[in-house]
Image (cartoon, rainbow, N blue to C red):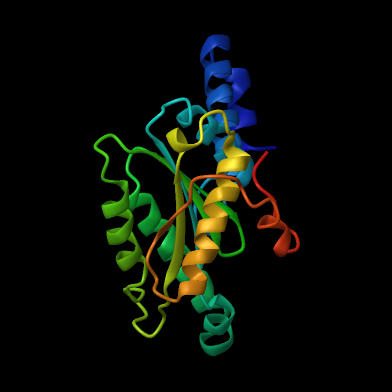
């Protein structure tokens, strides 16, 4: 029996249920967090991101770690985990007021509100920050490809479609080899983009 369960009978009913409800909420919140990075899981990110997309100034960002397998092969999986945790922390700090999630593996997503129209400049800075070596392990570093899309450019499209556009832009950035964020192009979405990578699909 847990300590909380043992205490509930001796607490006044209202206080006891309040404590229990708070404990349940904390456990639920933990379950919605990725255990390695502390970011929201895909499902939790999706719910919060959809709320932010009600703002026409919303920007959707997709980030993918470059050469991650090489990091694991060269420095070990512990170093790879440290790199992912570091990138997650830097993404969170670089997207204030937004929501950031780990979609799986070495892929992350964020939705931020671009209140002053400086998203492109801020993402350029963020890309450079993400490429810095890990503070406690200077030998562990790599670039991170970023693709982004402004929701207002594609009115009526949901999170899933916007993530596919950001994905298309991110892979264009990765192919260019310049480590510079790439904005999604206007026009028709290339539906085959997500299909090129097995197991990948946009948040629903």
* Residue at (61, 47) in percent of width and height: 189
Query: Residue 185, percent across and down?
Result: 48, 51
* Closer to the camera in the image, 16 or 146: 146
Identify which residue is drawn at 51% across, 15% down.
15
The total of numbered circles placed on residues is 0
Q: Quadrant of the N terminus?
A: top right
Q: Is residue 180 above or below residue 7?
A: below
Question: Foreground: 116 or 9?
Answer: 116
Visible residue check, residue 35: no
Does the image show residue 30? yes
Residue 50 appears at what percent x and percent y? 54, 31
**In this picture, is 59 found above or below 14?**
below
**Looking at the image, which residue sits at the far bottom?**
74
Q: Quadrant of residue 69?
A: bottom right
**Which one is in front, 26 or 55?**
55
Tell me: residue 91, above or below residue 65. Answer: above
Left or right of residue 65: residue 98: left
Residue 175 relative to residue 138: left or right:
right
Q: Residue at x 39, y 74 (%)?
A: 178
Of residues 22 and 122, the one drawn nearer to the viewer in this rendering = 122
Question: How far across and how far down the image is residue 43, in percent?
Answer: 63, 40
Q: Which quadrant of the figure contains the C terminus?
A: top right
Kindly give the residue lying farthest to the front in the view shown: 187
Picture coordinates of residue 127 (x, y %)? 35, 64
């Amino acid at each position: 029996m847990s300590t909380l369960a043992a205490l509930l009978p001796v607490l006044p009913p209202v206080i006891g249920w309040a404590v229990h409800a708070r404990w349940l909420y904390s456990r639920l919140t933990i379950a919605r967090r990725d255990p390695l990075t502390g970011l929201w899981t895909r499902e939790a990110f999706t719910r919060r991101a959809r709320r932010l997309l009600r703002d026409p100034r919303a920007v959707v960002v997709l980030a993918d770690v470059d050469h991650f397998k090489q990091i694991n092969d060269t420095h070990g999986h512990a170093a790879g985990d440290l790199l992912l945790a570091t990138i997650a922390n830097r993404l969170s700090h670089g997207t204030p007021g937004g929501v950031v999630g780990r979609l799986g593996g070495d892929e992350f997503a964020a939705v931020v509100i671009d209140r002053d129209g400086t998203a492109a400049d801020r993402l350029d800075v963020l890309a450079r920050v993400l490429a810095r070596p890990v503070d406690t392990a200077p030998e562990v570093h790599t670039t991170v490809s970023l693709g982004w899309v402004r929701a207002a450019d594609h009115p009526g499209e949901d999170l899933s479609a916007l993530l596919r556009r950001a994905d298309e832009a991110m892979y264009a950035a990765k192919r260019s080899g310049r480590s510079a964020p790439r904005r999604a192009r206007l026009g028709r979405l290339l539906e085959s983009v997500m299909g090129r990578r097995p197991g990948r699909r946009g948040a629903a």
